[in-house]
Every structure is written in C-alpha cells, then in structure tokens.
Amino acid sequence: MKVGIIGVGAVGSACAIALMQRGSAREIVLVDKTRARARAVALDMRYGAPVSPTADVRDGSYDDLKGADLVLITAGVNEKSGGATDRSDAEGRLKLLDANVSIYQEIVPQVVTAAPEALLVIVTDPPDPLADLTRHLAGHDRVISTGTVIDSLRFRVHLADRLGLNPASVEAMAIGEHGTSEVLLWSSATVAGLPIQDACQQCGEPFEKVREAVERDVRFANITIIEGNNASQYGIGIVCARGNGSGRARRAEHLPSCQLSTGLRRYPGVAQRGRPQRHHPGPYASDVGPRARAAPAQRRAPAGRGAPAAGCDPGFVTLSS
Ligand SMILES: NC(=O)c1ccc[n+]([C@@H]2O[C@H](COP(=O)([O-])OP(=O)(O)OC[C@H]3O[C@@H](n4cnc5c(N)ncnc54)[C@H](O)[C@@H]3O)[C@@H](O)[C@H]2O)c1
C-alpha cells in the first residue's frame, strides 16, 4: 500500500513512524509546505528502514502522491499555536476551524488531482467539520475523520487505571465532537462484559467517583499532554496506523464517528474504497446530555467557506473491508 502524509509536523511524523513500524505501508511519501522538514524526517526514518517492514520512505511533492491508496492529512494549525488549550473554553479545537479551512482549501484539490482514487483520512483539528469540507472539495465521499477514536482509547485507558485493570479488558467509547464537548458512553461501558457500575462495585470503587475523575481525565487529556510536550502526537499516530490496518483487514471494525443530520446525505465511515459501509445510530440517549445536543450547532462549517452546513448525530460506523 502506498500512503501519503500531508503535514510533517508532530502528528504527521508520529503517523509516519507508526505506519512504518506496523508495516501498514509499503511506500510512504511525506509532503509539507516546508520541504526541508519533510526531507529531514524522511531521511531520518530511512535509516530505520532496513530493520523495518516498510521498504520506502521519501519526501515529495503532490505529484509524488500518484497511485497513493491512502492520504493522511495532518497539516494545519495545532492546539497550542491556535490557542485551543484553555480547559474552560467550550469551543476547544473548533477554534482552529477557520485557519485550517484555508489550509485545506489549498491542499485538498492538489491531493485529489494527484491521487484521485485515494482514501483521505482527516486528522487535522477539528476533524469532523474538516472531513465534511474535504468531501465537498474532493467531490467524492472516500473521506474519513479520525473523529473520537483517540478519545475512546483515552476513555478505556483512564477507566482501566481507576479500576486497576488492563485497558484491553475495558470496552468504552466517546462520541460527538473530538474535544471538550465529547460524550462518554457510560451506559455501554463494560469490563469483560460486565456493566461498568457492577465492575466498579466489584473493584470497591464508588461509580460516581470513578465517573467524575475519568470524565475529567479524558476530556482534558489533550491539554494535559500539550502542557508537558507542546503537541499531542503519539496516540493519534498509532491510531492512524491502526486505522489504516483496519481498512486492510478482513473483518469489519466498529469505530466512533458521526453522520450528517441535514437529510441531504450521510456521513460515511470509509475503510476501503468501493466497499460497503454501515452507520449505526447509537441507542445511547441517556449519555447524550446537553453537551452533545449543543455540538451539532458548533459543528457548522464557516459560512461562505465552501462546506455545507450540517449538524452531526453521534453514532458508529462499521468499517468493512
Ligand atoms: N485528530 C486528532 O485526534 C488530533 C490529535 C492531535 C493533533 N491533531 C491536529 O493535527 C494537526 C497537526 O498538529 P501538529 O502538532 O502536527 O502541528 P505542527 O505544527 O507540528 O505541524 C503542522 C505541519 O503542517 C504543515 N503545514 C501547514 N500548512 C501547510 C500547507 N498549506 N501545506 C502543507 N503543509 C502545511 C506545517 O509546515 C507543519 O509541518 C493540528 O490541527 C492538531 O490540532 C489532531
């Protein structure tokens, strides 16, 4: 599989290294507006290539994306430089939308011209509105947002930490906006199939106490990381390499996403081009409080910027291959 990465900053580099180590790509092309940065990262990574499954890593121009199966777009203003690191600011990463819309308007047409068949994965914040814009700019629907996949993994990790368990035993998802207004689905969270309230009881932890602490840890995980290391990058890099892997897997995988609620068209989750996709509205009304109900209005793309205005309903997509 040939994979292009647009934007070789903290997140793009983490995606590249995770793809390389996982062996998810045969060929990786790194594109950045600062070519010297892409060149340096590619050169650095190439020294590890002889002992990794990926054969070829190089920097390139948009033309070099020709034949790419997948393009990850990570270019743009990040949370720190865009001022989206205030815990009390409900707008969160939506603050970055205007700046990153302009960047996407420049990038997406060039990607589509060079690699018209590629599946596009939107990582830049805020990913869901930018995925919608990308569908519009690309003129096709083979576009998926990283949505709340990393938030769901954070939910599992913090829940497991509180209960002294391995996160592999915990099933839990976050939906809605990737950011501080996200909704944690407590009603469907389980530990080895046991409802979370029962699991808390067995572990001797009061459920409400666990819930309060985990909500705080998950909702502000990103800001905590950025306060210490300027950018959140490694978790999302691993997720992107995994998402790419799930697109190639033989079995379907459920990931949290959302659908457009305008009635004009649905918000598809795409794992592999030309394959069926299903969307499952989540029956989780008890979890979807005021935060999620407020989210659709916040998700509107800026007027006059080329993207259709639409709200999103939380739900899941099945990624099929
Ligand atoms: N989806 C998620 O879960 C998630 C997680 C972490 C970060 N992010 C987002 O990912 C994005 C990247 O974050 P980062 O920390 O890597 O930022 P960064 O500043 O380290 O890197 C951004 C890169 O984009 C490049 N770039 C900017 N404009 C460009 C253009 N027009 N064409 C090509 N390249 C361009 C820059 O040169 C830079 O190398 C941000 O929007 C951040 O908020 C998303």
Image: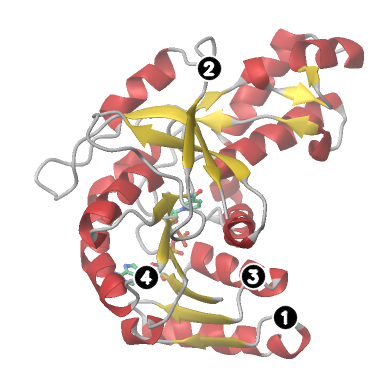
Quarter of image, res 241: bottom right
| Relative horizontal placement of residue 317, taking residue 137 as reference (left or right) | right
Whole-percent x and y of residue 226? 54, 49
Q: Residues within 10 Å of mark 3 (few under 14, many from 20)?
A: many
Badge nearest the viewer, 4 or 3: 4
Q: Residues within 10 Å of mark 2 (few under 14, many from 20)?
A: few
Q: Which disc number belongs to residue 280?
A: none
Could you tell me which residue is drawn at 43 percent across and 59 percent down?
A: 274
The colour scheme of the drawn protein is secondary structure
Label 3 vs label 2: CA separation? 34 Å
Q: Is residue 108 above or below residue 66?
A: above
Between discs 2 and 1, the one toward the N terminus = 1
Could you tell me which residue is drawn at 72 percent across and 31 percent down?
A: 171
Label 3 vs label 1: CA separation? 8 Å
Q: Residues within 10 Å of mark 4 (few under 14, many from 20)?
A: some
Whole-percent x and y of residue 11? 51, 62
Quarter of image, res 170: top right
Which residue has dot 4 on it?
Answer: 117
Q: Closest to the observer: 49 or 268? A: 268
Specify the amino acid type for callout 3: Ser
Which residue has dot 1 on it?
Answer: 53
